[in-house]
Image (cartoon, helix red, strand yellow):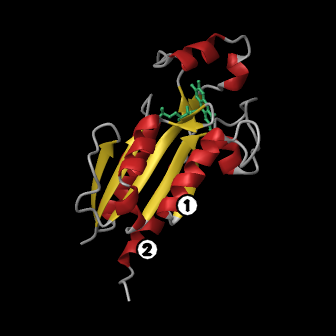
């Protein structure tokens, strides 16, 4: 039975929920799946395949999942790897391009505001992920900010337009993606 490690970075629990649902679906599909916060994840160990995801803040993945990938770059390059970003809040005026999920979440490939996207592109060039998916996120204004930059964005007069409140996570899309992962891993290596 293939063993999958699902690693996530999450400030407010939205991405953790996605990672946990992916783990549940993988287990329901007959795989072994461990779901771990990136700041507690050591190395890839005996996992046959790895899924890494992060909540997106100002066009960037959180540092813990980025560090997990950097630290395990060599091991990840030799295993099937899937990446996901959890971010866009539909209707946000900060939306970069709603027709292109990666640009919407992480910004353009080049030029101003491309730093977060470039970091993922560099890590992808070194690890060759099977897929790099974007899922809609969640924002609860009652949950206090966990970082200075979040505090500042929330204090801006336009914050209500930048951060539409709600849970927009699309569980059907998340579960379908997890089933795709399971199906890929079920195909025996020739
Ligand atoms: C201050 C702030 C900045 C954000 N910036 C982005 C962004 O640049 N791109 C994006 O797609 N989502 C952005 N989001 C939305 C979050 O990624 C979304 O709320 C996500 O579900 C958070 O995941 P978490 O709960 O796991 O931390 C931002 C949210 C906040 C509060």
The image position of residue 148, as x and y in percent, is 52, 15
Viewer-closest of 154 and 161: 154
**Helix, strand or loop status at disc 2:** helix
Q: Assign the N terminus to one quadrant of the image.
A: bottom left
Which residue is the site of mark 1? 125
**Residue 174 in sight:** no
**Number of disc labels:** 2
- Which residue corresponds to the image point at 57% horizontal and 19% vertical from the top-left? 149
Residue at the location (45% across, 40% down)? Answer: 15
- Report the residue marked by disc 2: 184
> Which percent across, then down, holds residue 68?
38, 46
**Picture layout, residue 95 above or below residue 44:** above
- Ligand 1 falls in quadrant: top right
Q: Where is residue 74 shown, x and y percent of the image?
A: 38, 61
Residue 81 relative to residue 110: left or right: left
| Mark toward the start of the polypeptide (2 vs 1) | 1
Residue 43, placed above or below residue 113: below
Marks 2 & 1, CB-CB < 8 Å contact:
no
**Would you place residue 141 above or below residue 32 in this image?**
above
What numbered label is drawn on residue 92? none
What residue lies at 69% left-to-right and 12% top-to-bottom? 156
Q: Quadrant of the C terminus?
A: bottom left
Task: Say what secondary structure mark 1 lies in.
Answer: helix
Please provide percent x and percent y for residue 37: 33, 40
- Residue at 29 percent of width and 44 percent of height: 41
């Amino acid at each position: 039975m293939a063993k999958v490690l699902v690693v996530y970075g999450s400030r407010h629990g939205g991405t953790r929920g996605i990672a946990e649902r992916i783990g549940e679906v993988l287990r329901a599909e007959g795989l072994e799946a461990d779901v771990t916060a990136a700041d507690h994840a050591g190395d890839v160990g005996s996992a046959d395949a790895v899924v890494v995801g992060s909540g997106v803040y100002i066009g960037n993945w959180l540092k813990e999942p980025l560090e997990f990938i950097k630290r395990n770059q060599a091991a990840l390059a030799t295993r099937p790897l899937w990446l996901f970003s959890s971010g866009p809040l539909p209707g946000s005026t900060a939306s970069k391009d709603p027709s292109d999920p990666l640009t919407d979440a992480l910004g353009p490939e080049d030029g101003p505001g491309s730093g977060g996207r470039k970091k993922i592109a560099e890590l992808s060039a070194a690890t060759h992920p099977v897929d790099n998916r974007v899922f809609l996120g969640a924002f609860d204004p009652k949950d206090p900010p966990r970082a200075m930059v979040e505090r500042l964005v929330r204090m801006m007069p336009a914050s209500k337009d930048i951060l539409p409140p709600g849970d927009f996570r699309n569980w059907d899309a998340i579960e379908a993606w997890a089933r795709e992962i399971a199906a890929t891993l079920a195909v025996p290596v020739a």
